[in-house]
Amino acid sequence: MKILITNDDGIDSPGLQKLASLLRAGGKHKVFIIAPDTNRSGISNALSLISGPVKLLAAGEDAWSCSGFPGDCVLIGLREAIIERPDIVISGINRGANLGTDIIYSGTVAAARQASLSGIPSIALSLAGNRPYNWDMAASWSAEHFEELLNFWKEGSFLNVNIPNSKGRPEGIETTWPAPRSYSDYLKLVTAVDGSQWCFLYGEEQLAGSEPGSDCNAISRNFVSISIIHNFPTVLE
């Protein structure tokens, strides 16, 4: 199987590199990497290619860094310009959760959405929790359950998968819906010598939505959360 891996944390992220290495092991899969050259978290579905070219640099075996955003990386990978068209796109493993409301902002999730819009099965993978991150567990679990995860994919959707950042292995898998999340953000203004004002955003993520069946609930109980997300917003009647 031909797999394209990208992310929004940058090409050097251990989540991406460890997963790529495990999926390449044994020669069963052909793995390509096209990922941002620096951290592009919170960029959602922004595309640099709309306004101009992006720069690619070779970054190892079948791997390239991209000056653009996660969505650009997927667009390039699907156009067969430098790699074969992939059978599946994996975005991640992200540093931190992408639960509930996070999917609106996440560049990791946006890359999976971009692939799915072209009819390619796609998975956004995130390690839900705080430092220290158990990358080895998350990568090995993802590689071992790769084909099982694919069975959840449906046409017109992508998978948003969150793995609990625990020392041990997850208790299992649950299909979930995205729970609303609140953020304890606050803005700090700093006035520079020249009179300009600089805005700094601070705050912490808050795990919300403890309702049974929600992604936050699954993570709180050490279960892997799999949400099947439709490509397009729905209209409330």
Image (spheres, grey):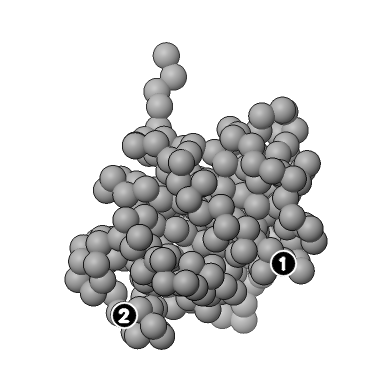
Tell me the residue that label 2 is attached to: 56
Q: Which residue is located at x 19 percent, y 71 percent? A: 81
Q: Earlier in the sequence, mark 1 or mark 2?
A: 2
Element assignment for label 1: loop
Query: In the rendered view of the protein, which quadrant contains the C terminus?
Result: top left
User: Tag 1: residue type?
Assistant: Tyr
Say left or right for 61 vs 168: left
Element assignment for label 2: strand
- Residue 6 shows in this picture: yes
Say left or right for 166 vs 21: right
Q: Position of residue 207 (x, y in %)?
A: 74, 44
Say left or right for 166 vs 3: right
Image: 31 above or below 78: below
Report, in whole angstroms, how far the alpha carbon at label 1 lies from the one at label 2.
29 Å
Q: Nearer the viewer, residue 148 or 110?
A: 148
Q: Which residue is located at x 60 percent, y 64 percent? A: 139
Q: Position of residue 218 (x, y in %)?
A: 70, 39
Q: Position of residue 197 (x, y in %)?
A: 58, 69
Query: In the rendered view of the protein, which quadrant contains the N terminus?
Result: bottom left
Q: Which is closer to the viewer, label 1 or label 2?
A: 1
Q: Nearer the viewer, residue 99 or 60?
A: 60
Q: Which residue is located at x 64 percent, y 41 percent? A: 173
Image: 90 above or below 117: below
User: Tag 2: residue type?
Assistant: Leu
Query: Neighbour class for label 2 at 10 Å: few (<14), some, many (≥20)?
Result: some
Say left or right for 92 vs 85: right
Q: Position of residue 188 (x, y in %)?
A: 69, 62
Q: Which residue is located at x 57 percent, y 73 percent? A: 18
Q: Nearer the viewer, residue 1 or 52?
A: 1
In the picture, the disc for residue 133 is: 1
Contact? badges 1 and 2 (CB < 8 Å): no
- Residue 47 shows in this picture: no
